[in-house]
Image (tube, rainbow, N blue to C red):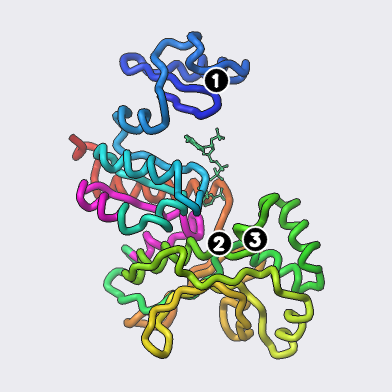
Amino acid sequence: MIADTVKGSVRNESRGVDLLKALEVAEKGKKLDGGELRGKPVSSSLEAIRTSDADIIVEATWTNLKDAEPGLGHIVTALENGKDVVTSNKGPIALAYKKLTNLAKAKRRQLRFEATVMSGTPVFNMRESGLAGAEIKSLRGILNGTTNYILTEMATGESYGEALRRAQQMGYAEVDPSGDVEGYDPAAKITILANALLNVQVQFKDVERIGITGITNENIKDAARDSKRIKLVASASHNESGRFNVTVKPLLVPDNDILAHVDGVLNALAISMDVQPDVTIIGPGAGGDSAGYGLLNDILSIHKLRPASSYT
Ligand SMILES: NC(=O)c1ccc[n+]([C@@H]2O[C@H](COP(=O)([O-])OP(=O)(O)OC[C@H]3O[C@@H](n4cnc5c(N)ncnc54)[C@H](OP(=O)(O)O)[C@@H]3O)[C@@H](O)[C@H]2O)c1
């Protein structure tokens, strides 16, 4: 079965779709359901998920932080139809964590989302195995490569505008960069981390969020004079009055803090726990290959937990 919003769709249950022929049709700019391929059309991506005999649905549509669609509908449909789900899409996990994890539990299916935070750098899978048994107390991270790249370039003397333009030329920043520079992307990621690793119910809309648009070269120079760096830090922890705080904001990070030395598009997450001092993981936070690796890692985890032979 192939279902594509632009190129059309086709399903052939008995013989499968002739993939070479499908490529030929698509390359000619024709629709897959135009009659050149044997099979029936599929009316929508939701029908494709409902009627597919796949064990695992890999959801990788675009991230929508307003209502999480179409990813949310895809994930709900997959779980309701008894399929495990692996996703790199932050929207549904940040906006509907509780609903989706409850549904997965009720349907006794796996919902895994390693690639939603720090792409293919292991966070959730590491928590399950490498940090098993530890109680995680708080999290602090640099979770957005675009803003970290801009701040790193500004530290070499580039203006905010020049650094942003360069980030756009390198493909790190979108034409509309607001999701990154206003801090929405790291706010979604820290929401996911807080819900999944700290077991607290945090809503994306409640994250206190300040982006990097107000940071000047002067601010960065002043920080350097005090042996500090300005970093956009996402954190989740209890404050002095015991209230749980989830924030994304530019902070002065002292030179002796490992986060001060995470430069360019790299991401990092410092995990504080009860049984040992902080563990910090540093790695790529974006890139198609890295996100693909995160998805593959989740598929392998599901396979370990539930070998294909156990599906009914
Ligand atoms: N690439 C990365 O560095 C990275 C890293 C970590 C996480 N992620 C996340 O992974 C997801 C995919 O990333 P990407 O870079 O591949 O995003 P992308 O380039 O925006 O691709 C999104 C894909 O979703 C398809 N799509 C949209 N609506 C659909 C619908 N209703 N039914 C079926 N397909 C639909 C689009 O198809 P059309 O092209 O036909 O519109 C497109 O192929 C995103 O949520 C992203 O945030 C990406």
Seen from the viewer's position, the closer of residues 225 and 6 is: 6
Residue 270 visible from this viewpoint = no
Q: Which mark is residue 146?
A: 3
Please, is residue 5 above or below residue 221 in the view?
A: above
In front: label 1 or label 3: 3
Q: Is 58 left, or right, of 162 in this rendering?
A: left
Please, is residue 114 above or below residue 282 in the view?
A: above
The local secondary structure at tag 1 comes to helix
- Which of the marked residues, 1 or 3, is nearer the chain's N terminus? 1
Magenta-drawn segment = 101-127
Quarter of the image for the N terminus: give it: top left
Q: Is 86 left, or right, of 258 in this rendering?
A: left
Query: Rounded to the nearest whole Å, what is the CA distance between mark 1 and mark 3?
Result: 35 Å
Seen from the viewer's position, the closer of residues 71 and 36 is: 71
Residue drawn 62% across the image and 16% down it: 28
Q: Which residue is mark 2?
A: 184
Q: Which mark is residue 23?
A: 1
Tell me the kind of residue under disc 1.
Leu
Tell me the kind of residue under disc 3.
Thr
